[in-house]
Image (cartoon, rainbow, N blue to C red):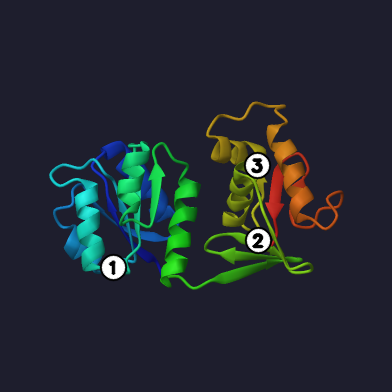
Amino acid sequence: MKTNVLYIEDDQDIGVWTHQYLEEHNYAVKWLRSGEKAMEAARSCQLVILDVMLPGLDGFTIGKRLKKECPELPILMLSARTSIDDKLQGLDFADDYVTKPFHPDELIARMEILLRRSGAVPEESLQLGHLSVFSPDNRIMNRDTGEEITLTGKQYHIFAYLLRHLGQIMTKEQMYEAVWGDPYIDGDKTLMVHIRHLREKLELDPANPRIIETIRGVGYRVKA
């Protein structure tokens, strides 16, 4: 079942891109260009993504009204306004504040954390060898030691990308372009270095990986 998200954003380019990305990742998105019908739309949603600079009432005003009307509804502010005063004003009522430009994987990770906290999405885990990967926030636990494994931002994006394509062989070109947002240059060792460090954290024996497989001459795969 898809999670219903209310997305309020007046920028056409950002709105189309974000709406499409969320729909591709199993969210049902109601996109409004202003806050005019926000109250009505919010009643059937599990989460609100709200821009600050909107025609008519600004996002701060709309967000405060939404929170008063639906206090348990998570609100994520998504704005180009980066000053500490704006962030503090937003976090006075919102549950999270993400600044533009943003990586879509980070946005989804923040959304899923809020959904889990609100109880809208139950915590589930994927078992990969000795690892438990908890969805929706991709928290990783080593079942043998009981310890949580902490990844860097790029390591997280690489692993999250492979998990979204579980069981599929992903080429180096696909992975590099998805994580770095730039065309892959043949011979570039950046991805390989990050994979090596990622394996050092995830694998029982990094020299003989069982979680992240190398498909020689093609790319990588995480098997279910």
Q: Residue at x 23, y 48 (%)?
A: 59
Q: Residue at x 39, y 60 (%)?
A: 27
Residue 173's place in the image compared with 8, above or below, is above
Q: Which quarter of the figure has residue 194?
A: top right
Q: Which residue is mark 3?
A: 171
Q: Position of residue 3 (x, y in %)?
A: 38, 65
Residue 101's place in the image compared with 33, above or below, is above
First reached walking from the N terminus: tag 1 or tag 3: 1
Q: Which mark is residue 71?
A: 1
Residue type (three-letter) at the residue carrying disc 2: Ile
Q: Position of residue 75 (x, y in %)?
A: 33, 58
Q: Position of residue 164 (x, y in %)?
A: 57, 55
Residue 116's place in the image compared with 209, above or below, is below
First reached walking from the N terminus: tag 1 or tag 2: 1
Q: Distance from label 1 to label 3 (Cα)?
A: 44 Å
Which residue is at the front of the view, 170 or 42?
Answer: 42
Residue type (three-letter) at the residue carrying disc 3: Thr
Q: Which quarter of the figure has residue 195?
A: top right
Q: Residues within 10 Å of mark 1 (few under 14, many from 20)?
A: few
Q: Position of residue 199 (x, y in %)?
A: 76, 49
For residue 204, side relative to residue 2 (left or right): right
Q: Which residue is mark 2?
A: 140
